[in-house]
Image (cartoon, rainbow, N blue to C red):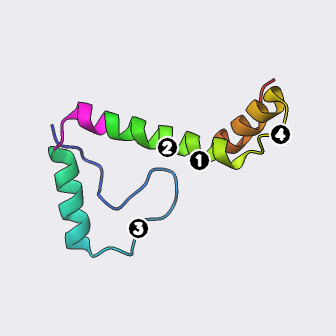
């Protein structure tokens, strides 16, 4: 199955990437679509883990644990913590 997502569009952002030549963008997209769905899923999970680690690293360690978790939630999800 081949994805119907255009290689230079990102959902709900209102912009597209314009700093890569279209033929290179197409090549990267085609190579990504040649990977198995499991490989693509693992890449996405790895990217999320990296993003989480970066956010955790940016929050001061001297905060109490609950305040640190709250700050993480607000920074990672972009909305106030529900607790």
Name the secondary structure under disc 1. Answer: helix
Say which residue appears at 25% left-offset and 47% top-offset. 4
User: Image check: 80 left or right of 75?
Assistant: right
Q: Is residue 76 magenta?
A: no
Q: Residue furthest top?
A: 83
Judge depth for marks 1 and 4 and give the one in front.
4
- Image quadrant for the C terminus? top right
Instruction: Kindly identify which residue carries mark 3.
Output: 17
Above or below for 5 versus 52: below
Name the secondary structure under disc 2. Answer: helix
Judge depth for marks 4 and 3 and give the one in front.
4
Please state which of residues 83 and 18 is positioned toward the viewer in this rendering. Answer: 83
Instruction: Kindly identify which residue carries mark 1.
Output: 54
Q: Are marks 3 and 1 in contact (CB under 8 Å)?
A: no
Judge depth for marks 3 and 1 and give the one in front.
1
Say which residue appears at 42% left-offset and 65% top-offset. 16
Residue neighbourhood size for the residue with mark 1, other residues' Cα within 10 Å, grouped as few (<14), some (14–19), many (≥20): few
Q: Residue 1 appears in which quarter of the rendering?
A: top left
Instruction: Kindly identify which residue carries mark 2.
Output: 50
User: Image check: 15 left or right of 40?
Assistant: right
Q: Residue 17 appears in which quarter of the rendering?
A: bottom left
Q: Which span of residues is magenta-colored?
A: 35-41
Task: Measure the alpha-carbon separation of dots 1 and 4.
Answer: 17 Å
Does label 3 or label 1 sit earlier along the sequence? 3
Does label 4 or label 3 sit earlier along the sequence? 3
Q: Residue 77 appears in which quarter of the rendering?
A: top right
């Amino acid at each position: 199955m081949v994805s119907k997502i255009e290689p230079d569009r990102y959902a709900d952002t209102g912009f597209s990437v314009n700093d890569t030549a279209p033929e290179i963008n197409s090549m990267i997209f085609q190579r990504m679509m040649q990977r198995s769905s499991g490989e693509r899923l693992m890449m996405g999970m790895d990217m999320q883990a990296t993003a989480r680690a970066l956010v955790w690293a940016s929050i001061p360690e001297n905060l109490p644990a609950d305040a640190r978790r709250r700050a993480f939630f607000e920074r990672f999800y972009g909305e106030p913590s529900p607790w």
